[in-house]
Image (spheres, rainbow, N blue to C red):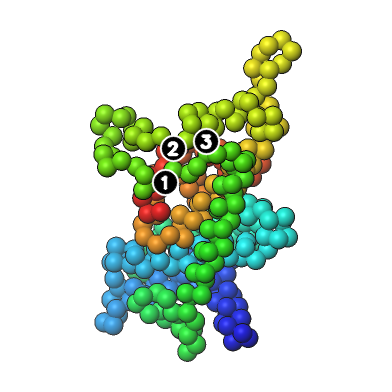
Amino acid sequence: DNATAELLQAVHDLLVSLLMMDIRPLQESKWNDPLQCFLAAYALREDKSFMQAHHITQPLAKCKYFIRSVVFWQANLIVDDFNGSFQDASEQICLHFLNHEKLSAYYNVCSISSYATSLVLTQPLIPNTTWNPALDVVKIDGKLLPLSTFRHGCKDLMVAIGDALQAVKMGHNIPITNLLEVGDNLSNMELGYSYLGLQKYTEEHALLKAFTTDKDSSLFYIDPDGKLCLSRRKAHEWMLKASNLNLLLGFGIHLTSGQPPRSPELCDIRTRNGERRRGIMKDHKKTFMVTLQCKAGNI
């Protein structure tokens, strides 16, 4: 109805404003960004003292989840203009709202949180913006704006992930692993790093067979001299499908409540607690996952 539409638009406007500031001018005026204002307001106690940084970690994480969901939501609104490609739509959103030098839906938010401690310990002037303890309602100038409206966007995301998985499978019977079928013994002690050898989910080497024998999806071909050659065109098609799937799964991971999983992420291509590069590469402004070292325990 009209009331719901107006509320949704108001929430959009509020959260999109959290994405629009570049980090550099904020160094001069810390009150130009609503997220930083929220941090300061949340950390201020009634006795005018400030909470320690580790006490606001969970509220900050929840707030960041909401902001990340807006990026997906905005991309979802314009995906039809990009022939259904969430990859292209999200890139457009990042270019429009975020730092133009980095195509990352999370760059600014993560950068802001990196100096949250210095923020809450410096300027005690609090703006007229308050949040309830559960971080599901924000009050701005007396108006309450529930943020739970965005959660139904996750349903559209799950549908898009399913479609992307089907595209990568290209019609072959290569089922996604069902964790309910995995045996009770999940120890890595005798099986190397993986426990998947306990179960057989499909015929052996099904994906490799699809690569090498199917004329429509083959990544390899035999040249007139009998040499095995890589089909660059097919390889590029597969990489595009995989990159789109990786993007969707990245959104799915960060829209899931709880601690972010330690997996190849779409943040700024760095590990969660360090500077070591992940096993990924960038090509034509797209991010590809080229290793499978993923521990996504919250999915």
Q: Amino acid at mark 1?
A: Asn
Q: Is residue 249 above or below residue 130?
A: above
Q: Which mark is residue 212?
A: none
Write down the quadrant of residue 83 in the picture. bottom right
Of the two numbered discs 1 and 2 on the same chain, state the one appearing first in sequence: 1
Residue beneath label 3, please? 290
Residue 49 shown left or right of residue 224 in the figure: left
Q: Residue at x 42, y 46 (%)?
A: 178
Write down the quadrant of residue 287 in the picture. top right
Q: Residue at x 53, y 31 (%)?
A: 206
2 vs 3, front mark: 2
Q: Which mark is residue 178?
A: 1
Q: Is residue 79 above or below residue 226?
A: below
Q: Nearer the viewer, residue 288 or 241?
A: 241
Q: Are marks 1 and 2 in contact (CB under 8 Å)?
A: yes
Residue beneath label 2, please? 201
Q: Residue at x 51, y 64 (%)?
A: 154
1 vs 3, front mark: 1
In space, the residues marked 1 and 2 are separated at their CA atoms by 9 Å
Q: Residue at x 27, y 42 (%)?
A: 184
Mark 3 surroundings: few (<14), some (14-19) or many (≥20) residues within 10 A:
some
Mark 1 surroundings: few (<14), some (14-19) or many (≥20) residues within 10 A:
few
